[in-house]
Image (cartoon, rainbow, N blue to C red):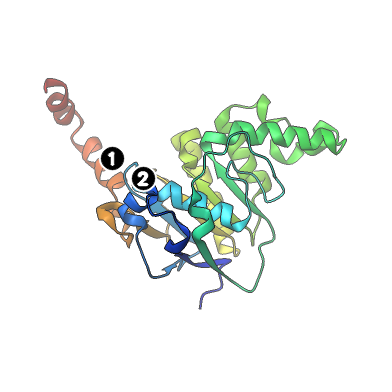
Amino acid sequence: MNDRFIQKIKIDWTKIEPHSYLREIPALQFEDELELERNITFFVGENGTGKSTLLEAIAVAYGFSAEGGSKNYAFSTYDSHSELHGAIRLSRGFQKPTWSYFLRAESFYNVASKTEEYRKDALLPEQIYYDRFGGKSFHHQSHGESFLALAQGSFKAGGLYLLDEPEAALSPQRQLTLLLEMYRLAKQGAQFIIASHSPILLGIPGAQILSFDEGVIHECGYEETESYQVTEMFMNNREYLLKRLLEE
């Protein structure tokens, strides 16, 4: 048995409606438990293979809002998440995380707005509240700046963090900064579960990479990921590939 906060994931398909679209996503049709073996686990795969759907369901089953935030963020601007969370069974470790956060690119604006509401409700001065987030409101920073400020100011050793395509807001340089931050915290007992297409983030040493391609969730190496292979092919053969693609 490992010592991670979320150790294994199982789907109870008796809790899913017979005609649910979830039954049409091949990679999600696993019956055995899915074990998270390392402090950093990536979900990778083509769009539509179910990686973000599963990550979101894990987050909601753990107690997060589907839109993101810490477990204290109890809000919803639009209920678009699937019924999968009700069928998720999580095997948890004995220890509880010191802090936890669900970060997703597509709804971070809503989370940033809610953060500001919570600050005002608590009557906390803006400067004091945002000192750990770059010294100002998330809405006064770019999307990428606020993403990174949150990670650097809020993520802690011994925490649990679920990230849905964090690279969407980050430049390559800032993806490297996030990679270093995750690597440092994972060494101090933090656990990360991340859905990502980034060949930069996926390169973090020692990570478990679970591919949703080929209709079944399976572990793969960094250089076996499509993100790496397509990026390498383009970088090494850019002129030839573009000529072929643009002529078709």
From the image, which quarter does the C terminus lie in? top left
Question: How far apart in space, not on screen, are marks 1 and 2 (Cα)?
Answer: 7 Å
At 59% across and 48% down in the image, what residue appears? 102
Residue, far front: 18
Q: Position of residue 104 (x, y in %)?
A: 54, 41
Q: Nearer the viewer, residue 105 or 198?
A: 105
Tell me the quarter of the picture where residue 127 sits: top right
Circle on res. 231:
1
Q: Position of residue 28 (x, y in %)?
A: 37, 56
Residue 211 in view (yes/no): no
Amino acid type assigned to the residue bearing label 1 in the image? Thr
Residue, far top: 247
Assess disc 2: are there few (<14), some (14-19) or many (≥20) residues with their C-alpha within 10 Å of its C-alpha. many
Q: Nearer the viewer, residue 29 or 243?
A: 29
Amino acid type assigned to the residue bearing label 2 in the image? Pro
Circle on res. 34:
none
Tell me the quarter of the picture where residue 235 sits: top left
Is residue 108 shown above or below 64? above
Which secondary structure, mark 1? helix
Q: In the displayed structure, does residue 141 sit left or right of residue 245?
A: right
Q: Nearer the viewer, residue 142 or 108?
A: 108
All told, the count of numbered labels is: 2
Q: Earlier in the sequence, mark 1 or mark 2?
A: 2
Q: Which residue is mark 2?
A: 199
Q: Position of residue 192 (x, y in %)?
A: 53, 56
At 47% across and 37% down in the image, what residue appears? 173
Which secondary structure, mark 2? loop
Pointers 1 and 2 in contact (C-beta within 8 Å): yes
Residue, far bottom: 1
Assess disc 1: are there few (<14), some (14-19) or many (≥20) residues with their C-alpha within 10 Å of its C-alpha. some
Residue 152 in view (yes/no): yes
